[in-house]
Amino acid sequence: MRFRATELTRLTRLGVTSMICLAAGVLAACEQTTAGTVVRASGTTTTTHPDPAEPVPGVVPTLPDHIPPNALACFPTSSVSGRMTAAAVPDRAAPRLTVSLPDRWRSVAGDGDRALTLTGPDGMSGVVTIAATDLEPGGAFLKYAVAMRDSRPGVKFTVAAAQFCGYSSQMLTGTFQGSSGTFDFVDRLTHIWTNTKKYLVTIQLQSPVGAAGFDASKDTLMQQFAVVIP
């Protein structure tokens, strides 16, 4: 089925931020999580079972629609900083993106689902991926977060709604333990539908904790981006 998000939903929900945590692979309101337990401000530790009806941050409803070939489906109207950089993968049905690259950052085209490999100053790095998915937005976001939890030791993060242009989108922000110390990270996830497939777009940024340019790089790299549907 083809999908198109309603303009009304975009206008009424754009910019709404909902902060939550991810615990044991399910979404639950909390302050901090470690390996599936919830650590609250009081210092007491409990395990939570979230309400299945609780909405997933950044997920917007969609309605059937047809997208013309090579349509510019999204062109953010907000102020955009940085250097505009094309991001695409070999899959001919995949959306083509234009993302914002911070100053002093370099990009190299990847292969497979990896559209770009990014290298910045002060040990910062990033990746842009465009991968087909059979899942709807909420399921795709949850699957990504569970895999990320398993691949980043000691990860602690929050989730914020970041929908734009009618697309479901969210940002994961936190820290994890790498081989050389603690790292800050931000991952932007966006679910994009085309006439034939659904895709999960990820923009990842990580940095040694305390890197001077992290906040500025995050503000640029995690901006809304342009989308062309083939």
Image (cartoon, grey):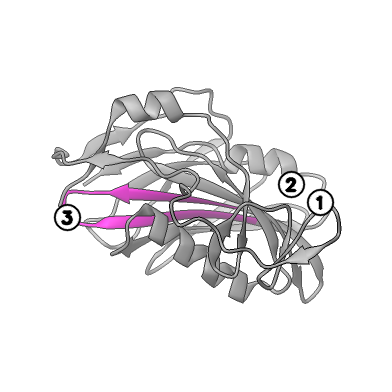
Q: Report helix, strand or loop for mark 1.
A: loop
Which residue corresponds to mark 1? 211
Any mark on residue 214, and which?
2
Task: Name the magenta segment's main secondary structure.
Answer: strand
Q: Position of residue 204 (x, y in %)?
A: 57, 56
Q: Is residue 156 left or right of residue 211?
A: left
Which residue corresponds to mark 3? 196
Q: Nearer the viewer, residue 84 or 46?
A: 46
**Counting other residues with Cα less than 10 Å from the Cα at mark 2, is it few (<14), some (14-19), or many (20 or more)?**
many
Q: Position of residue 41 (x, y in %)?
A: 82, 52
The reply to whether discs 2 and 1 touch (Cβ–Cβ < 8 Å) is yes
Q: Is residue 149 magenta?
A: no
**Counting other residues with Cα less than 10 Å from the Cα at mark 3, is it few (<14), some (14-19), or many (20 or more)?**
few
Can you tell which quarter of the image residue 63 is in? top left
Three-letter code for the amino acid on which mark 2 is drawn:
Phe
Q: Nearer the viewer, residue 27 or 191?
A: 27
Q: Residue at x 32, y 62 (%)?
A: 135
